[in-house]
Amino acid sequence: MQAHWQALTVLTVARTSMGFQFQSIASVSPDLVMQLGLTYADLGTLIGLYFLPGLALALPGAALGRHFGDKRVVSFGLLLMVAGGLATTWASDFASLAAARLLSGVGGVLLNVLMAKMVTDWFAGRREIVLAMAVFVNSFPIGVGLATLSLGTLAGLAGWGASLAATAALALAALLLLTLAYAKHPNDGIGTTVGGVISAPEAMLVCLAGAVWGIFNGAFAVMFGFAPTFLAGEGLNPTQAGLLVGVATWLVAASAPVGGIIAQTWGRPAMLMAVGALGWAACLATLALAIGFAGPALISAGLLMGLPIGVIMSMPSQALRPESRAVGMGLFYTWLYVGHGFMPPAAGWLQDLTGSAELPLLLTAMLVGGILPLYGLFQIVAQRRYRSDCPRR
């Protein structure tokens, strides 16, 4: 295997452990609610805590990789994921679960920020970079899908502690894979200065792109985090709910590269964004309101929501110059963590306040629908910036 494809394979497989660990709390949520007496706000907070450290670490993450080396920092992140996974196994209440979840999340953030840079190093200047990034991004939903398919069943057989311990085992396996099979790129540990190189127009554009990506990921977390409990209320047992959510997650992983190929072949990213965002919002509303249609709605959401992923991930490249890309991508990822960190707790708080399992999904549907005007505003600002720059070129 050529070096760049081997690097992509190793990094993608290793990053799957992050999605697996992220989804673990949601996969055993019925047991945590019953056995530890957690509220739905507690559950949402635990889900969101995994990515909350990104608010502080996304921007300096590139600096850590530049100073210590990307592979070293990612390896340290995997060690933190192992430690956090083991700590959740021994937790006995919300506070101890939250502390362990936060520790795991710090490791996950280091993976998320630096691995994207490592894949870019290997594929920069190659025409396969779009495909490579689509495959790499898909590692997260694949990990989520593996968790939803397996951890609920494992919890039923051996308890929720065994399911959470499995996340530490997978992170350890990822660390061994990275250590043994990943060869450092010549650009490992070398990057541009993290501060002071991004212009105000670039910052505005990348914030719009980041808001789109943050809403997308926050909605992803709410839908797949609360779906098992919602489906249990519809009469499904934990195994059936986990299987249905797992299938939907795998469909996201399948539809994402299909969306990237469609956008690249037909050249109509706006239409793809509209179909994905509005279709996903409609599926969420149907899931919440149409009793008896939860299965078809969830499956349809999985088919539709992956379509615009490639379009969204290409937005920062339209906004950033090469010299501003490091800080710009850190800013982009900060918005991702805003969505991941705050939307699930807000959804849980709303469910506790109202006693309605439907309202969090309806609110999420409205936010997903808001992705489209944000994308339109991004394109308008980007075109105006391009026209204003043309006379100086």
Image: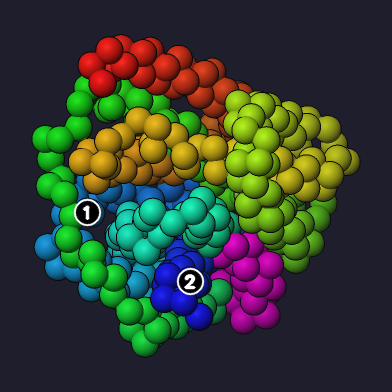
Quadrant of res 323: top left
Q: Position of residue 64 (x, y in %)?
A: 17, 59
**Which amino acid type is marked by label 1?**
Ala
Q: CA distance from mark 2 to mark 1?
A: 23 Å
Q: Residue 66: horizontal and vertical position, in percent?
A: 16, 60
* Residue sitting at the far right: 292
Q: Residue at x 68, y 49 (%)?
A: 258
In percent of the image, x 62 and y 33: which residue is there? Answer: 267
Tell which of 54 and 92 is nearer to you.
54
User: Is 248 located above or below residue 276 in the figure?
Assistant: below
Query: In the image, is 238 to the left or to the right of 261?
Result: right
| Marks 2 and 1, the one that precedes in the sequence | 2
Q: Magenta stretch containing residue 346, yes or no?
A: no
Q: Is residue 156 magenta?
A: yes
Taking the spot 29% from the left edge, 70% from the top edge, the residue there is: 185
* Residue, disc 2: 5
Kindly indicate whether the residue at mark 1 contacts the one at mark 2 (C-beta within 8 angstroms).
no
Seen in the picture, residue 145 relative to 79 is either above or below; the reply is: above
Answer with left or right where residue 393 lies relative to residue 63. Answer: right
- Tell me the SS state at disc 1: helix
314 and 137: which is toward the camera: 314
* Residue bearing mark 1: 62
The residues colored magenta run 142-160
In the picture, residue 199 is in which quadrant?
top left
Identify whether 250 is placed above or below 305: below
| Residue drawn at (26%, 41%) of the image | 322
- Return the x and y of residue 20 as percentages of the image width and height: 53, 66
SS assignment for the magenta stretch, majority = helix
Residue 206: image x %, image y %?
34, 31
Q: Report helix, strand or loop for mark 2.
A: helix
User: In the image, what residue type sits under mark 2?
Assistant: Trp
**Marking on residue 187:** none
